[in-house]
Every structure is written in C-alpha cells, then in structure tokens.
Image: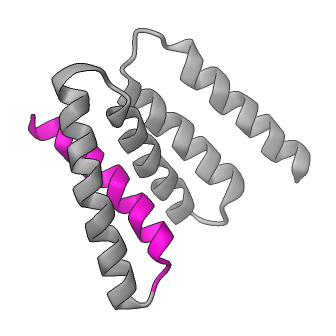
Amino acid sequence: MKKLTGTLIVVAALFSASGMAAEKTTKGAVAGAVIGAATGKSLKSTASGAVVGAGTGAMLEKGDKGKAARKGGVVGAATGAGVAAVTGHSVLKGAALGAGAGGVVGKATH
C-alpha cells in the first residue's frame, strides 16, 4: 500500500507539472484528486481532494482572477467552518472544503 501511495503521489506531481499550458485551477484539481484517491478510502475523498486542489490553484492565479478567488476562499472557509461546526463535522475539513469551493466560485464569477 505504501508503494502504491508513493507511486500515485509521483504521478500526481508529474500530471501537475506536465501541462504547463494548462491553468493552475485545472492542475490543482487533477493533483488534488489523485492525492485524495491515494490517501482516502472512497470517491468522496477523491472529490474533496479535487475541490481543495482546484480552489488552491485558483487562489494561486495572478491578477484580478486570483484576487477574486482569494476573496472567495476567505468567505468559503468561514462558511464551511460554520456549517461544519453546526452539523457536528470536522471544522478544519469544512474550512478546507469551503475555501476550495469559494476560491473556484470567486474565480468563476469574476
């Protein structure tokens, strides 16, 4: 299992570095999905990894779109943490997912 996890992380790194023409949001989503699949137990882990990776990639963009993504990420993190606390889930995980979703939405709406 450790070999498989290590292999998948290396593949994720190659995918994220290979498409230099691809935007950072796409590369982040692919890398996040691969890492989520390697370390998680279900499809939910893969989807969560993709959301967090896409949001991180969007927030790393330069210019106005990156700034909008960062603002969306802040709002999403606060909202995700609040919803997770109210529903009894992990606040940290809620903040991470909220920030990822908020970053993607912030970039898309700009």
Q: Is 5 left, or right, of 73 in this rendering?
A: right
Residue at (36% x, 43% y) in the render: 55
Q: Quadrant of residue 78?
A: bottom left
Q: Position of residue 89 (x, y in %)?
A: 46, 83
Q: Quadrant of residue 85?
A: bottom left
Residue at (28% x, 45% y) in the render: 103
Q: For the view shown, which residue lies furthest in the left direction?
A: 110
Q: Position of residue 38 (x, y in %)?
A: 70, 50
- Per the picture, the main secondary structure of the magenta-coloured stretch is helix
Residue range corresponding to the magenta coloring: 89-110
Residue at (26% x, 69% y) in the render: 79
User: Does 90 lie within the magenta span?
Assistant: yes
Residue at (58% x, 17% y) in the render: 17
Quadrant assignment for the C terminus: top left
Q: Position of residue 64 (x, y in %)?
A: 16, 25
The answer to whether 68 is drawn above or below residue 21 in the figure is below
Q: Position of residue 77 (x, y in %)?
A: 33, 61
The answer to whether 1 is drawn above or below residue 87 in the figure is above
Nearest the eye: 12 or 59:
59
The answer to whether 83 is drawn above or below residue 52 in the figure is below
The answer to whether 11 is drawn above or below residue 79 in the figure is above
Q: For the view shown, which residue lies furthest in the top direction?
A: 21
Nearest the eye: 7 or 68:
68
